[in-house]
Image (cartoon, rainbow, N blue to C red):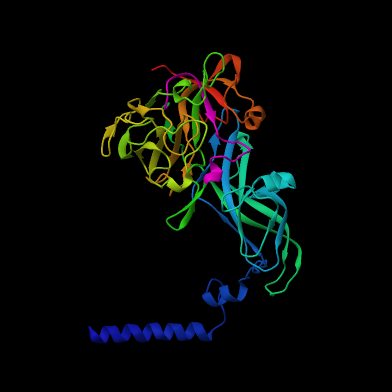
Amino acid sequence: MTTTGISMSRCALAVMLIVAAGPAVAGTPQAMRAHATTPPLPDDTFTPVVVQPLGTRHVAVPGTDGLVHVVYELELANTKPAAATLQRIDVLDADHPSRVLASYAGPSLVASLRTLKPTPADSAVIPFGVSRLFYVELAIKPDAVPRAITQRFRLLGAANPGPKTPATPLEYTAGRIDVARAPLPVLAPPLRGSGWVAINGCCNSGIVHRGSFQAVNGSLHDTQRFAIDWMRVNAKGELVQGDPADVNHYVDYGAKVYAVADGTVVDALDNLPDQPPGKLPDPTKITLRTVDGNHVTIDMGHGLYVFYAHLGKGTVRVHRGDRVKAGEVIGELGNSGNTSAPHLHIHVMDSPSALASDGLPYVIDRFDLSGQIDVQAFDKSDVLTGQWGKRLAKPIVENDRFPLNLNIVDFPAK
C-alpha cells in the first residue's frame, strides 16, 4: 500500500510539471486567468450624513384608498464638523433609479423631520454630531410596488474628512429599503358595532404614533408605526355626549374589546385608574410599565404580538399564560395610562415588548368603510366635542384591508 501511494504521487507530480511547462490550453486555470476581465470597482462617495433605516422588516400594506402603503423611517446623522443642510430628498425605485416615487423639499422636507427628543425639527439643518429622523409614507398602485427603495440626497455638507472643510453641494444615494413580499397578518376586528374612528392612524401628516419612537434597551424602536387609537361616534357624529371631563360621556367608554387572533397572553395589567379626560398625567410619574395603562399583550405565533392599551381598571378578563380565541372578550375600553381621552390603542409588533419592538403592518379580515372625518378640520381642533365625520350613502365592504387615518368603519356585530 505504501508503494502504491508513492507511485500515484509521482504520476500526479509529472502531470503537473507537463502542464506548467506547456502552452496555455483553453479552459485551464492559466488560460482563464489570461483572458479574464476584472470589472472596475465602483467609485466610493464621501457621505458626511450617514443614513440608517429603522426596523428590519418593511412590508407594503393595502389601505382603504385602493393603494398600497410603504411606511418607514431613516435616521440621518451628520458625522463631520460642517453643518449639513438638507435641500432635497428623492425617494427612488432602487431597481429603476429614474423612477421617482416621492420628493421632499422646503416645507415638506422639514415637516418630515423629527429630533431625537422627539419633537418636530425647526429646519433642515443637521449640526455636527446630531441625528434627525426622516419619515417616509408612500402610497403606490398595487401593481407598481418596487422590490426595493433608495433615497437620493441633495445637501450642503463636508465634501472631505478635513476638520475645517466648508459645506459644499453634494449628491448621493443611500438608505436602501427592501420591500418584503411576506404575507401580512390577518386580524379579526378588535371591537364590535358601528361608528369606530381610526384616530392617529396611517398615514397622518402629524406623524403622531410614529413620532413616539423610544430609545429602549440600547436601540431606537418605532413600535407604534401602525398603531391606531379607536374612538367611536354616535349617529349624530359625536365622540362625546355631555361634559368632556367625564369619561362616562364618551361614546366609546366601556365598550368590550376582543381578541383579534388565537394566541397566548404574555402580559396583562389591570390595576391602574382612569386618567381624568382633557389632560395627560405627570410624565415624571410614568414608567415603562404604566405608560400604556391597563393593557394586554397576546402572542399570535410566528413572531407576531398584538398589544392593547388604556383598558378600564378591573375589566381585564385574561391573565398571563391564558390561551385565547379570536373573538373572545379580553377587557373593556377605558382611559388608563398616558391618555387624554378614552380610546383603544392597538398595534402589532415583532416582540412581546410594547416599547422595545418593531411596529408591523396588518390587515383586518372584514369591516365596512362607512365614512370619513375631515383630516384638516380634526387636526386643527383642540377639542373632541361637536359633530364629526361625513357618512357614505352606502358603506363599502372591505376585506383584508388596513383602515387609514380618520376612516369611520363599522365592525360586524358578532
Q: Is 41 included in the stretch rendered in magenta?
A: no
- Residue sitting at 35 percent across and 31 percent down? 313
- Residue sitting at 60 percent across and 23 percent down? 372
- Give the vertical position of 83 relative to 212 (above or below): below
Foreground pick, 100 / 164:
164
Which range is magenta? Answer: 190-212
Side (left or right) of 217 relative to 196: left
- Give the vertical position of 34 relative to 321 (above or below): below
How many numbered tags mark residues here? 0
Instruction: Say if residue 103 shows up in the picture.
Output: no
- Residue sitting at 55 percent across and 34 percent down? 200
Foreground pick, 275 / 179:
275
Q: Residue furthest left?
A: 1
- Give the vertical position of 81 relative to 181 (above or below): below
- Residue sitting at 59 percent across and 16 percent down? 391
Q: Position of residue 283 (x, y in %)?
A: 48, 45
Foreground pick, 298 / 268:
268
Q: Position of residue 32 (x, y in %)?
A: 57, 73
Q: Position of residue 389 (x, y in %)?
A: 60, 20
Q: Is 196 included in the stretch rendered in magenta?
A: yes
- Quarter of the image that includes the C terminus: top left
Q: Position of residue 12 (x, y in %)?
A: 39, 82
